[in-house]
Amino acid sequence: MTSPPSTVFANVYYERKTATARPCYICNRPTQTVLATIKTEDFLYTCDNHLLDPASPIAPPPTVASSPTPDEIRKVVEDYKAREARKSKDQDKEKESDQDRKDEKEGQTKSSSAGGGSTNPTPVGATSPTPAAAHRNFTLHRSIFEMRKNEIKRKEMGAKAREVGKGLPQVPRTGF
């Protein structure tokens, strides 16, 4: 007749920010950072320091080494080609300017000026804004996670007891 607890959730919590500060679950300092499960069945407020501290009962999110995307590879290749083209143009200009110097030393003046125009470097492709980071996920220490589960279980049992208690008759309150 005993039913399993209605809320079964994994030990995966996502970091979110709130508008109002509440006391931290661990140190009771006011904080706006909250860790919540994906369906917000459970949540707890925690300081940013606890999220960054390796000795904290909240494990930091695992770092994932992502491979470069095809767009990133294409951008790097284009930047490299553009730099190489600029280098070759600069070398050609240097050769021309060396020849001009030799001609001037010989006494010959050229009416046309070589390299007189200002060169604007090719604007590097507009960097796309980095996508907004998704909510970081954390894993609670097993003892804290067990405390959270027990607390939720206790709340559910209390709510169930109040519900069952509504059907029972009240105690008589007459005086003797």
Image (tube, grey):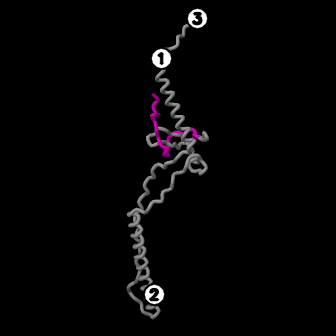
Q: Which residue is mark 3?
A: 176
Q: Residues within 10 Å of mark 3 (few under 14, many from 20)?
A: few
Q: Earlier in the sequence, mark 3 or mark 2?
A: 2
Separation of marks 1 and 2 at Cα, in angstroms: 105 Å
Extreme residue toward the front, this view: 1
Quarter of the picture holding the N terminus? top left
Picture disc at residue 56: none
Question: Which residue occupies 52% across, 47% down?
Answer: 139
Magenta includes 76? no
Picture disc at residue 168: 1
Q: Earlier in the sequence, mark 1 or mark 3?
A: 1
Instruction: Indicate which label's residue lies in the foreground, 1 or 2.
Output: 1
Separation of marks 3 and 2 at Cα, in angstroms: 120 Å
Amino acid type, mark 1: Leu
Q: Which residue is mark 2?
A: 98
Q: In x, y percent, where is residue 160?
A: 48, 26
Q: Secondary structure at mark 2?
A: helix
Q: In x, y percent, where is residue 6?
A: 45, 34
Q: Which residues are magenta?
A: 1-25
Q: Secondary structure at mark 1?
A: loop
Q: In x, y percent, where is residue 148?
A: 54, 38
In which quarter of the view is residue 71 placed? Answer: bottom left
Q: Nearer the viewer, residue 25 or 76?
A: 25
Q: Nearer the viewer, residue 94 or 114?
A: 94
Q: Secondary structure at mark 3?
A: loop
Magenta includes 4? yes
Question: Which residue occupies 51% across, 43% down?
Answer: 35
